[in-house]
Image: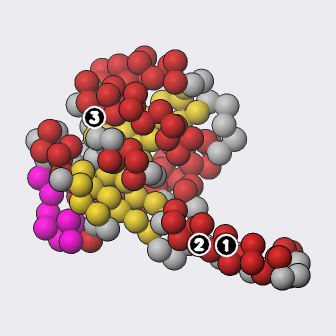
Amino acid sequence: MEAELGSKRLELLRSIVPGLTRVAVLGARTDPFTQPYVQDFQSAATAAALHLQLVLVDGPRDFEHAFAQMGASAVQAVVIQPLFQPHTAKIVSLATRHRLAVMSSYRDTTEGGGLISYSADHAAYFRRAAVFVDKILKGAKPADLPVGQPTKFEMVINLKTVKALGLTISPSLLARADEVIQ
């Protein structure tokens, strides 16, 4: 599902960052998920007439250089591949230094100073998994259980970051947020 949310994420960034023209995607060079994740963003950026900069790293030790590169190329926002969620503090620190808006899949990143997170509701995933585990423990064959796409999505916005970046946010977008961090 993460690889299918590019256009929605770019739409949200465009509604928050005025005059958005340049967005980066921070991805992992060796992760097989990176290619479909980036392809979705490339298609969405082309449709939205945005310049997309792909920044691939081998790991957290490359973050300093990656953010310096983004800052030097006038990127306004960066979308973080979910794989990097454990490195939220370092990512937010570097983004703050380079005045980049950070969008993530995880609310932790937004709570830690990122601008916005948007993804399928992770708590709903776990509740759904519990239903499957219950059915399997009662004898259901896993191959016979239906697989469905998430239907509930979560958007979290950090107003402190909005203000720090000198942005304004529309009341309608704030009303659509599941959580607004003061």
Q: Which residue, given by chain and number where applicable, does mark 2 sit on? A: 127
Crowding at mark 2 (Cα within 10 Å: few <14, some 14-19, many 20+)? few
- Image vertical order of residue 144 relative to residue 113, above or below: below
Residue 42 image position (x, y, % from top left): 49, 47
Would residue 46 be found to the left or right of residue 97 on screen?
Answer: right
Crowding at mark 1 (Cα within 10 Å: few <14, some 14-19, many 20+)? few
* Three-letter amino acid code of the residue under disc 3: Leu
Q: Is residue 11 magenta?
A: no
170 vs 23, nearest the viewer: 170
User: For the residue labelled by badge 2, is the local secondary structure a helix, a strand or a loop?
Assistant: helix
Q: Residue at x 39, y 53 (%)?
A: 107
* Three-letter amino acid code of the residue under disc 1: Ala
Crowding at mark 3 (Cα within 10 Å: few <14, some 14-19, many 20+)? many
Q: Which residue, given by chain and number where applicable, does mark 1 sit on? A: 130
Residue 130 image position (x, y, % from top left): 67, 72
Whether residue 11 is visible here, answered yes or no, is no
Residue 151 image position (x, y, % from top left): 51, 76
Q: Which residue, given by chain and number where applicable, does mark 3 sit on? A: 100
Q: Residue at x 44, y 51 (%)?
A: 106
